[in-house]
Image (tube, rainbow, N blue to C red):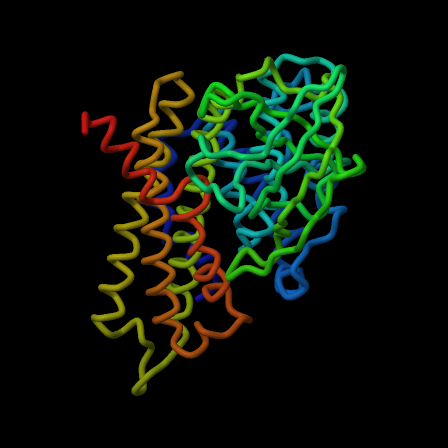
Amino acid sequence: MTRSRVSANLGRMADFYDNFLDESHRLLRTSCRRFAEAEIRPHVHDWEEAGIFPRELYTKAAAAGVLGVGFPEELGGSGGGALHQLMSLEGLMRGTSTGVAAGLGSLGIALPALVQSGDHGLAERFVRPALRGEKIACLGITEPGTGSDVAGVATRARREGDHYVVNGAKLFITSGVRADFMTVLARTGDDPHGGLTFFVLEKEMPGVTVSRSLKKTGWWASDTAELAFSDVRVPVENRVGPEGSGFKTLMRNFQTERLALAAYGVATAEIALEESMRYVRERKAFGRPIAGFQVTRHKLADMATQLLAAKTLTYQVATRMDRGEYVVKEVSAAKNLAAEVALAVTYEAVQLHGGMGYMRETVVERLARDARLLPIGGGTQEVMKEIIAKSMGF
């Protein structure tokens, strides 16, 4: 069964989702998908095995209008809201590598603080070049001793005249190995939340070191780093916003990051389902296609049902974000549900593929190992549940 025929069979479900979209969303999704199918998918296996994708992919993505989605046009972006960002990520995932999508998308978590600061100098020096694909950006939050609890950030920035002196370390930093600059959360005061401030550190600054490139279970094609900062002198003009503004900025941007992770989960499940539908029509056992067995059809029905629930919730949350509604509980729920569905659907996809599902040459094998990060990244599943519970009054 061809991929085009599988996509046609899923068309009615797509029509249901399209009720959330207008023509600009559909056109963006199509253009990003075409970019991924032309520029990523033919090379993705080699890039995964190499553990990195070519740097020129950033400039290609910028030229195709992929990198600027969600950023103001006056800064070189292409505008759009949460649903547009959702469409761009869905399209990019058609390359079948969450690592490539996340690597290209690291500016999506590194730049918002700079944009929101309203600092023209920061925008010209860092935002514009990143949106053109000329500079790679990363976000530095997590530390060796601090994960989802950002109040425990220990990296410290001490003011000395026209500079801050930064000391500390960051861990699990997507695009950190080859980033040209990094948006780093550091402690400028003792208050657990009010004492946090963002700074832009540049790779060439003395004292900035990539301690190691990390090897991961999945997301192989995205470089992931441990960074160290030793007496790094950072000009005051590289401070993002006033001192103490970091926590509020981070909490606002966490919602966009969590929506992106929900998008990865939904796209992962959708592609895994499509691959499985095609495979069970082709693969024979006991003299007939395995699609002819009831157990196979029921697995596919369960996978489709789970996908429908996760994708509908994710689209609805993005729609409400675009309306300016407060959806912290809902986006946390969408992230958790999409992650759970991605894990469940890829598990069944590997099972339906049998031995081939365990081979690195197959799409479902890659999707399955990539999916394991989704309940961890951007705030763990347990932290999301705490957020939901607190919003319920507990």
Q: Is residue 159 left or right of residue 276?
A: right
x then y, percent, for residue 383: 34, 39
Q: Nearest the camera: 7 or 391?
A: 391
Residue 88, visible in the rendered structure:
yes
The picture quadrant where one finds residue 139 is top right
Q: Nearest the camera: 56 or 136?
A: 136
Q: Residue at x 37, y 63 (%)?
A: 277
- Reply above or below: 345 against 23: below
Q: Residue at x 32, y 49 (%)?
A: 307
The picture quadrant where one finds residue 141 is top right
Residue 16, visible in the rendered structure:
no
- Reply above or below: 386 against 284: above
x then y, percent, for residue 100: 60, 50
Q: Is residue 74 left or right of residue 250?
A: right
x then y, percent, for residue 58: 71, 42
Quarter holding the C terminus is top left
- Reply above or below: 186 against 280: above
Q: Nearest the camera: 233 or 18?
A: 233
x then y, percent, for residue 96: 53, 55
- Reply above or below: 221 against 263: below
Q: Residue at x 46, y 42 (%)?
A: 147
Give the number of marks. 0
Quarter holding the N terminus is bottom left
- In the rendered image, the residue lying farthest to the bottom is 286
